[in-house]
């Protein structure tokens, strides 16, 4: 999916909502666990309930890899079920030496044809470039994260700057706003506007809204640009809004609430 398609979907739906399919088999409703593929049945119901309000789905691969071969099958079936025209993200946080990154890129752009994949930039340009070679695909690079441990490295001085700012500026030169996004945590309220000033055109994938304490209004006020420019991810707050037979209806209602909050700014 190219930038113009993503932007058109954002303004058509008046939404920048990304639903995170962080499907923990231990947390899905009990009545699904007797089915042949409980994870896929859960995801299918969530997608059906939220697709009206959603411009992206993010599949956190850890929850599928942990289930072994069956988990990869659930991932594949889920990816195939997501409606065409909705942006797909493999939240895999890959990043390794060049020839290994080439195989990771093939995995998530060819074998499992996601629109994008999350990548860690710690090993430098040769670990990220293999992802950027794929036409029509997006590389989403970790920039400023919302976890407590981000202070260990990201917020530390690096020369006359902070490390995360140096990472953002350096990585931005490897691609362009049509194939490169950055993960920017919503709980870093004091830095949201600063990062948007630094990177006025790029899209941001923004986790941390909802359970982690971030809010839609603060993110939108500080990071929206003329193309939308953000995907606000909500995982637990939507997919686990209910834990009984009404789970899909509750997910629908939560997704609708988020979309209505976003529509005010779009």
Image: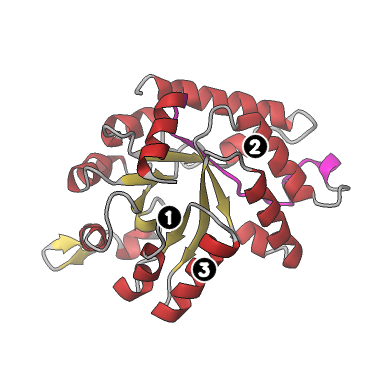
Query: Taking the image as drawn, is residue 189 in sight?
Result: yes
Query: N-terminal of the two: label 2 or label 3?
Result: 2
Query: Measuring 38% from the left and 42% from the top, which residue is drawn there?
Result: 186
- Residue under label 2: 47
* Tags 1 and 2 touching, CB below 8 Å: no
Q: Which mark is residue 106?
A: 3
Residue interval drawn in magenta: 13-32
Query: N-terminal of the two: label 3 or label 1?
Result: 3
Q: Which mark is residue 137?
A: 1
**How far apart, in angstroms, are the residues tagged by discs 2 and 3?**
26 Å
Query: Measuring 45% from the left and 46% from the top, which residue is drawn there?
Result: 1
**How far apart, in angstroms, are the residues tagged by discs 1 and 2?**
22 Å
The secondary structure that dominates the magenta segment is: loop
Helix, strand or loop at mark 1: loop
Its colouring scheme is secondary structure
Residue 20 drawn at (x, y percent): 56, 44
Q: Which mark is residue 195?
A: none
């Amino acid at each position: 999916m190219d930038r113009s398609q993503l932007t058109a979907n954002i303004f058509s739906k008046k939404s920048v909502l990304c639903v995170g399919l962080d499907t923990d088999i231990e947390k899905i409703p009990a009545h699904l666990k007797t089915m042949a593929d409980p994870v896929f049945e859960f995801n299918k119901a969530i997608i059906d309930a939220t697709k009206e309000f959603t411009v992206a789905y993010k599949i956190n691969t850890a929850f599928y890899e942990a289930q072994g071969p069956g988990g990869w099958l659930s991932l594949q079936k889920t990816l195939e079920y997501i409606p065409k025209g909705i942006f797909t993200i493999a939240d895999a946080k890959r990043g390794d030496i060049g020839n290994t990154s080439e195989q990771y890129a093939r995995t998530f752009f060819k074998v499992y044809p996601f629109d994008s994949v999350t990548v860690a930039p710690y090993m430098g340009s040769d670990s990220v470039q293999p992802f950027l070679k794929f036409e029509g695909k997006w590389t989403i690079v970790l920039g400023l994260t919302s976890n407590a441990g981000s202070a260990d490295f990201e917020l530390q001085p690096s020369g006359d700057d902070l490390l995360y700012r140096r990472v953002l500026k350096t990585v931005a030169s490897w691609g362009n706003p049509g194939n490169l996004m950055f993960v920017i945590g919503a709980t870093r309220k004091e830095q949201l506007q600063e990062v948007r000033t630094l990177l006025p055109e790029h899209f941001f994938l923004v986790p941390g809204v909802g359970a982690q304490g971030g809010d839609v209004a603060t993110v939108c006020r500080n990071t929206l640009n003329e193309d939308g420019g953000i995907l606000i991810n909500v995982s637990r707050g939507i997919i686990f809004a209910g834990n009984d037979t009404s789970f899909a209806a509750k997910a629908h209602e939560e997704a609708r609430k988020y979309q209505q909050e976003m529509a005010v700014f779009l």
